[in-house]
Image (cartoon, grey):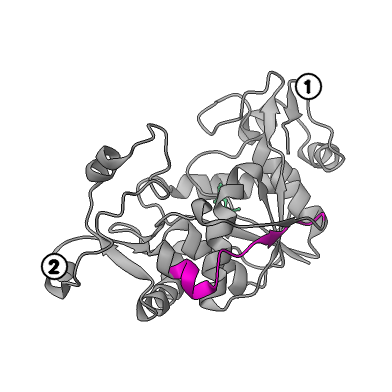
Amino acid sequence: MITRFAPSPTGRLHLGHAYSAALGRRLGTRWLLRIEDLDPGRARPEFVEGIREDLDWLGLAPDGEPIVQSQRTHLYAAALEGLKEMGLVYPCFCTRADIAASLTAPHGDAGSAYAGTCRALPDDPERRTSTPHSWRLDSAQAIARAGGVPGWREQDGSLHQGTPDMIGDAILARKDAPSSYHLACVVDDAESGVSLVVRGADLRPSTPVQRLLQTLLGLPEPTYLHHPLVTHEDGRRLAKRDEAPTLQAMREAGVDGRALVTALTMGNLPTGYRLGLP
Ligand code: GLU
């Protein structure tokens, strides 16, 4: 079983990351570390260093060299080319402001709620050369080509059906980033042979679009384990911006990292925290 831990170096890791890492390590005969550093505005080298320090302290040693996404952009570009050749993506010239203005739901996710402004534009290579743009999945075409929205299998054996409303015209590459999370994630999971994707339940909405991309790109289907999130005792979610529960703070307070991993692996959380609903 090949599992992976795929943090984004956009802040210090917290207890939720430690839980995910401990679970992935326990379930994987090989456990890989992948640094998801494709967001140039938010990824920072000091947080990559922080991830190494935290994993060291937890006594969790990844198998093999870490996979660093910013060094692999040619792989994502090739996958995007494949989707272009199949006619399943289109360039999007909308600005963030355009997209925000077109959203109906105030807290909607920009990917799924995108109004499709650029979907039916005639191809204009000159504009593409002169104007920064993103590439979006043409979800209707993509679903038709895949013969429907693929489902996924969770590690407990349950099967989950994907439905078209779970898939938006997701951005697959941005003007300032060579690949979006979804595209890089499926390319890397396949390329490194990940057979079980262990990640928090907050990422479950990503799974249908990732399964669709896997189907279109002819990539193997992993099994998924979307684990419950670690929350504060009162149910509040841990966020990267919360200072208190970072692993760095726990280490500095004298907590034993290896003992923490043993406890987390048995589902025992430190005082003040608990596991949320699955
Ligand atoms: N990089 C993502 C995060 O930090 C995790 C991606 C995944 O596990 O698929 O939330």
Left or right: 230 with respect to 209?
A: right
The total of numbered circles placed on residues is 2
> Is residue 215 positioned above or below 158 on the image?
below
Q: From mark 1 to mark 2, how far is it between C-alphas?
A: 57 Å
Q: Earlier in the sequence, mark 1 or mark 2?
A: 2
- Locate residue 67: give its quadrant: bottom right
Disc 1 marks a residue whose amino acid type is Thr
- Examine the structure image and report whether residue 233 is included in the region drawn in magenta: no
- Examine the structure image and report whether residue 148 is included in the region drawn in magenta: yes
Disc 2 within 8 angstroms of ligand 1 (CB): no
The spot of residue 249 in percent (x, y) is 63, 29
Q: Which residues are magenta?
A: 142-156
The quadrant of the rendering that contains the N terminus is bottom right
Residue drawn at (29%, 39%) of the image: 100
Residue at image mark 2: 127
The spot of residue 77 in percent (x, y) is 39, 73
- Locate residue 200: give its quadrant: top right
The spot of residue 154 in percent (x, y) is 74, 56
Residue drawn at (70%, 42%) of the image: 18
Q: Nearer the viewer, residue 44 or 141?
A: 141
Label 1: state its secondary structure.
loop
Q: How packed is label 1: few (under 14 Cα within 10 Å), some, or many (20 or more)?
A: few
Residue at the farthest top position: 234
Disc 2 marks a residue whose amino acid type is Arg
Residue drawn at (67%, 73%) of the image: 193
Disc 1 within 8 angstroms of ligand 1 (CB): no
Q: How packed is label 2: few (under 14 Cα within 10 Å), some, or many (20 or more)?
A: few
Left or right: 116 with respect to 240?
A: left
Q: Nearer the viewer, residue 132 or 139?
A: 139
Q: Which mark is residue 174?
A: none
Residue at image mark 1: 271
Left or right: 259 with respect to 106?
A: right
